Image (tube, rainbow, N blue to C red):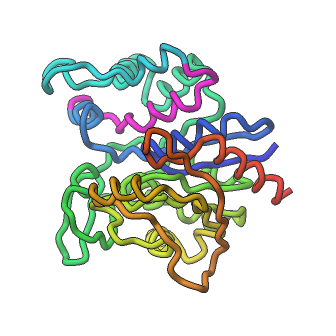
Amino acid sequence: MKNVVVIGGGTGLSVMLRGLKQIEDINLTAIVTVADDGGSTGRIRRQFHIPAMGDIRNVMCAMAEEETIFTSLMNFRFEGDDGDVGGHNLGNLILTAMTQTSGGFMEAIRTFSKFLKVKGNIVPCSLQVITLYAIMEDGTIVRGESNIPEFNNRIGKVFYDKPVEPTREALQAIHDADIILYGIGSLYTSIIPNLIVDGIVEELKNNKAPKIYFCNAMSQPGETDYFSLEDHVRALQKHSFEGAVDIVVTHSNKASSEILEKYKKMGSEPIKVVEKEHTFDILYRDILSFEDNLIRHDSNKIRDIVKELIEQIG
């Protein structure tokens, strides 16, 4: 049985995990960022001083054995202003209650994962309440994950303002991994926040398992404007180490001109390969869907690609 570790956060990670949970005979672990500070998650962080749980909740629902009415309720958001329960997510409130009654955040995740019959392990990268910072290329410093994309500036690097201790479970999962995947999602605010936690890069470097990056299909306004595929990899390497990526999976199927024009108006452009030589392999695969004129990664297509990669490593 192969140990498969996926590192990331946000909706992109959940899309991947919906596919990967269907693969038989693997031990699946999701290492999830806890740097989110916006919306319901941010309010709970400030009020109860517990790690950000929004991405954890999304991953739980994605990895549940069956997505039922209860998993839908986990994502239900109360209407109203930011007062009392207004604007809060029901799943976040449940996880907060379980954290306070079960002995801690990690125990709450384990308990609720059993209740949802989660297929795999969900591991926060840290149990600390952490704040992500970015230093822009012009020297401007931005505080808070939710503020970084709003600044409309080119990001130089992201960092924490204090040492961040990793969870023992995250380090162990990376140590034992047979294949490591960097998830689809926001480069600077979903994937890299995991890599800059103390000890994570060292474990990644020591493990010679193949490290595979599923690159985004479109640029993200405020984070990766005008980025090529190579720029994405360089950002990952800058925040980790030179050999952090062995293979990049990117899309071979193309959206229609009408869809691309719609995304262009929103400030988003296709991610392209622009250089001829690389220190990593590139796999071009049919991994996108265009349902409802939206560009999305397809969970089942990702599943099939990862199965193919697992078979290749033997």
For residue 63, above or below residue 2: above
**In the rendered image of this protein, does residue 60 appear above or below residue 52?**
above
Residue at 35% from the left image edge and 21% from the top image edge: 76
Residue at screen point 50% across, 80% down: 274
Name the residue furthest right.
314
Which quadrant is home to the N terminus? Answer: top right
Choose between 172 and 2: the one closer to the eye: 2
Q: Provide residue 58's location: percent of width, then percent of height.
A: 45, 33
Location of residue 54 in the rendering, given as x and y in whole percent from the top left corner:
38, 35
Considering depth in this image, is 280 or 103 the residue closer to the camera? 280
Residue 161, can we see it?
Answer: no
Q: Where is residue 244 in the image (x, y as percent from the top left)?
A: 58, 69
Image quadrant where one finds the C terminus:
bottom right
Q: Residue at x 50, y 26 (%)?
A: 107
Q: Is residue 33 left or right of residue 27?
A: left
Q: Nearer the viewer, residue 162 or 55?
A: 55
Query: What segment is highlighted magenta in the picture?
Result: 47-67
Q: Which residue is drawn at 13% across and 25% down?
A: 81
Query: Residue 234 at what x, y percent from top left?
Result: 47, 75
The image quarter containing residue 48 is: top left
Residue most extreme to the bottom: 277
The question of residue 84 being in magenta is answered with: no
Establish if 38 lies above or below 171.
above
